[in-house]
Amino acid sequence: MRIAIFGSGGVGGYFGGRLAQAGFDVTFIARGEHLSAMRESGLRVDSIAGGFILDKVNVTDDPKTVGTVDFVICAVKAWQVIAAANSMKPLMGDDTLVIPLQNGIEATGQLSEVLGVDSVLGGLCALIAFQASPGHIKHIGAYPLIRFNRVNSEADVRVNYLTEMFNQCPGVKSSIPPDVNVAMWLKFLLISPWSGMGAVSQAPIGVLLELTETRQLLLDCMQEVQQLAVSQGVNLMGDSIQKTIAVLESLPKSSTTSMQQDMAKGKPSELNEQSGAIVRLGKAFDVDTRVNCFILDSLRPQELRARGALKF
């Protein structure tokens, strides 16, 4: 089985590195200094689940040189998905499956429009990791979990194969959700309100949960996401919000999201794919998303500045 990791930052670098560590045929798609460092020195992963170093890895910035593969792990930022879908076409064979691991809720549909519905799974992961420096990934929180399945829940032996491959990797747990749509919305319920509130407040999750006011705003954001899911026929359980809060309470109190970190550094972020998606879907399905709308509008100037569309 041949696997391409499209996007080799914190998420792609970690899961791709674990697959390569376990002896599977992995090619990383990377760019810039990260590409150069991986070509020269391989990949280093520091992890709370056990670090490792790969002295040599297969890495390129040109998918055309790779040929077709069996699986593509799409681990780019959510706002890069459409461009990535077009760039990964040379990797696609008749039986290739693409697994999106973005924080948003729209990546599966975006990939399917370009590559075809039959070639794309629904997917998600749990992992707090980032690119510390070129060729160096740090995993600092959450035991690494990766889940994927067909959006129509039809059985597919290839899904089973990839799940078994991940479960042969140290520091990874993989499973097949019976309804991946529910699983993706549960992830969205966790990450998007946290990202938005974290970016607006510039505070870590421990502070957001400790203060009565910010905790209530976080709950209000989650209620809007839950109502959105239900409006689209996704059956989120009545205690989904309570369970999500419990997950957040189990994280290190200093934890922040990648969107929050990007905005703090003045970099383009996934604001449009997280808070923006909630607001767009709310308008489309007639769901009140006023709290998330406030977050989106409050952060919009920073996002526009990061993308060079506004100066201040």
Image (tube, rainbow, N blue to C red):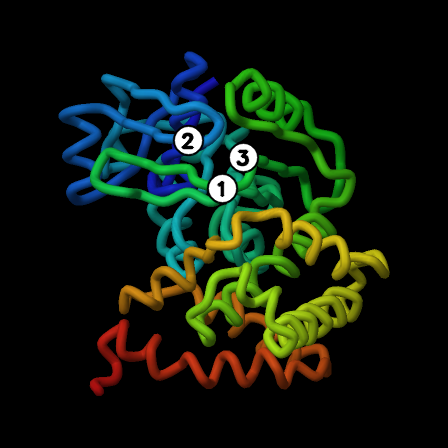
Q: Position of residue 163 (x, y in %)?
A: 61, 25
Q: Which residue is mark 1?
A: 141
For residue 305, above or below residue 266: below
Q: Residues within 10 Å of mark 2 (few under 14, many from 20)?
A: some
Element at badge 2? Answer: strand
Q: How many marks?
A: 3
Tell whether 275 sits left or right of 199. Answer: right
Element at badge 3? Answer: strand
Marks 1/3: CA–CA distance: 8 Å
Identify which amino acid the numbered label 3 is placed on.
Pro
Mark 3 touches mark 2? (CB < 8 Å): yes
Q: Nearer the viewer, mark 3 or mark 2?
A: 2
Q: Position of residue 218 (x, y in %)?
A: 63, 71
Check residue 47 in the rendering and tell me which mark sits there, or answer none.
Answer: 2
Q: Nearer the viewer, mark 1 or mark 3?
A: 1
Q: Position of residue 60 (x, y in %)?
A: 23, 32
Tell whether 243 sits left or right of 116. Answer: right
Identify which amino acid the numbered label 1 is placed on.
Gly
For residue 87, above or below residue 299: above
Q: Which residue is mark 3?
A: 144
Q: Position of residue 2 (x, y in %)?
A: 43, 21
Foreground pick, 252 / 237: 252
Q: Residue at x 62, y 78 (%)?
A: 213
For residue 100, above or below residue 237: above
Marks 3/2: CA–CA distance: 10 Å
Identify which amino acid the numbered label 2 is placed on.
Ser
Report which quarter residue 58 is drawn in.
top left
Report which quarter residue 47 is drawn in.
top left
Tell whether 25 sits left or right of 37. Answer: right
For residue 131, above or below residue 248: above
Marks 2/1: CA–CA distance: 9 Å
Q: Residue at x 64, y 28 (%)?
A: 159
